[in-house]
Image: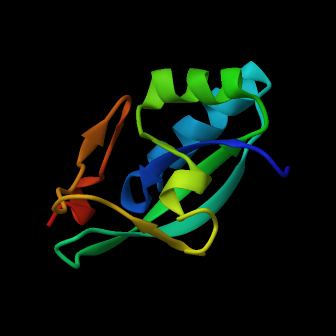
Amino acid sequence: MTRCNQVALPDDISIDHNYTLVTRFLRERGLKCRTRAVIAAWEDVKQEQWRLHCFADRYAAAAFLDHFGGIVFDPKRDRENGRARGIWHRKGTYERILEIGHLSVMEALRK
């Protein structure tokens, strides 16, 4: 998959029951995606691991984004034309996402 449409979700919102929701959503719609990890780094030096859900088809990515929310990840823009491998330079200051779309961080990870 050389060119994909990517949707990013925080890693801690992508586990446990939420992982099941995501895989069920994909399976029921016959969608396929590859998942990759990226470290998001904000200007205030806070870092957090995120998951990129990479789709070959922009309509599949749009359906995923509409259902679960997330942030559109553009490798050209967000990885400095490919020079920043494995890191996603984010603007502004870090704000933790506890709920997005149909997903929420489990209670044990909220602290």
Outermost front residue: 81
Describe residue 68's horizontal placement relative to residue 43 as left or right: right
Residue at 57% in and 43% down: 20
Q: How is the image coloured?
A: rainbow
Q: Where does the image place residue 73, in percent across and percent down from the top left?
A: 52, 47
Above or below 39: residue 62: above
Describe residue 36's horizontal placement relative to residue 106 as left or right: right
Describe residue 64's horizontal placement relative to residue 111 as left or right: right
Number of marks in the rendered image: 0
Above or below 46: residue 24: above
Of the pair 33 and 23, the residue shown nearer to us: 33
Q: Where does the image place residue 96, in percent across and percent down from the top left?
A: 20, 56
Q: Where does the image place residue 26, in percent across and percent down from the top left?
A: 69, 31
Outermost bottom residue: 45
Residue at 24% in and 50% down: 97
Of the pair 49 and 12, the residue shown nearer to us: 49
* Image quadrant where one finds the C terminus: bottom left
Above or below 60: residue 55: below
Q: Where does the image place residue 15, in percent across and percent down from the top left?
A: 47, 56
Residue at 57% in and 66% down: 37
Residue at 16% in and 73% down: 44
Above or below 107: residue 53: above
